[in-house]
Image (cartoon, helix red, strand yellow):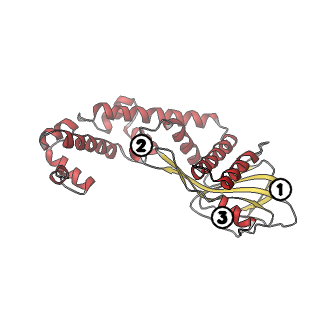
Amino acid sequence: METEKEQKIDLYKVRKLPLGAYDFVVHYAELLDEFNAEFCHSHAYMEMFYIQSGELTILVKDEEVSMKSGDIMIVPPLIPHHVQNIPDKKKTYFVMVFEFRPGNSQLLHQSADLREIHQIDTLLQQLPQNKYVLCSTDWDASAFFDQIAVEYNEKRFGWKMYTNMLHYGFFLHALRYLITNESDCEEADDALNLAVKAIKYIHAHYAEDISLETLAAYLFISQRHANSIFHKMFNTTFGEALRALRLTYAKSLLTTTELSDEEIAEKVGFSSSFALRKHFKQNEGITISQYRNI
């Protein structure tokens, strides 16, 4: 029979929650108490602490940080930290080690929640990278933990995915307290608006002789700014995105028409059939002739 501690560990085993253009990945999450012992450590992910009851002291880069019920803290990646173990002081706290990372790049312009998801990613990137972020709240997150326990105990259809969604809901709710600077949100919105305009421009003009220069002129910004916005929002370059889109349309024509390589190259914006064949082989690992014979 499982012990209560084993059930706790199993309860908070979570995985990746796909969000279209991004993935919310929880590497570890658990509700702990005063008997938890921890050593100083750091890792490549963000770590969030939420105090459900009692008080907690965390050492972050040798600084003692005291937290009480309702407090939330995020420790950035690679920052040494650990919880002080004081068994005679009762407490309950939730720990979540997570990352918010680009997922399927092909869905970057298709996600229904593109604006909000990019805003979250941008705001997380703006958190101080050499220090923790801490805020005090009157939030009682017990309902999240109770619902997770119900899902784990009943194991009804979809319980694993729903548990992941509950963790994401907890993360979003905590972020509302941690992110209070409205100017950051406005800056993220402005950047995203430009990025969305850039994607629409590429879709409308991919068959033409367009470049980063023509895109920047269309957006009324510098080429450097256009390139920075594009890479920040879509984790790729303008040239790579344009090439990928042209190849996608080329593949469609290869499977639905009898057009020659030269005709297809012209229709999707490649400078020559040689350029089309070259990029097709690099991207697909096979030649156009082999692709047509599949």
Q: Nearer the viewer, residue 201 or 11?
A: 11
Q: Nearer the viewer, residue 142 or 233?
A: 142
Compute the Cα span from label 1 to label 2: 43 Å
Compute the Cα span from label 1 to label 3: 21 Å
Residue drawn at 59 percent across, 58 percent down? 77
Residue mark closest to the camera, 1 vs 2: 2
Find disc 3 in the rendering and name its residue: 80
Picture quarter with the N terminus: bottom right
Find disc 1 in the rendering and name its residue: 55
Residue mark closest to the camera, 2 vs 3: 2
Residue drawn at 70 percent across, 41 percent down? 177
Q: Nearer the viewer, residue 255 or 208?
A: 255
Left or right of 19? Residue 130 is: right
- The amino acid type of the residue labelled 1 equals Glu
- The amino acid type of the residue labelled 2 equals Leu
Q: Which tag, 1 or 3, sits closer to the chain's start?
A: 1
Q: Which tag, 1 or 2, sits closer to the chain's start?
A: 1
Compute the Cα span from label 2 to label 3: 35 Å
Find disc 2 in the rendering and name its residue: 107
Mark 2: secondary structure: helix
Mark 1: secondary structure: strand
* Badge 2 density bin: few <14, some 14–19, many ≥20, Cα 10 Å: some
Are the residues at dot 1 and dot 2 in contact (C-beta closer than 8 Å)? no
Q: Which tag, 2 or 3, sits closer to the chain's start?
A: 3
Residue 128: image x %, image y %?
62, 50
Q: Residue 48's quadrant in the figure?
A: bottom right
Tell me if residue 183 comes above or below residue 247 in the rendering.
Answer: above
Q: Which mark is residue 157?
A: none
- The amino acid type of the residue labelled 3 equals Pro
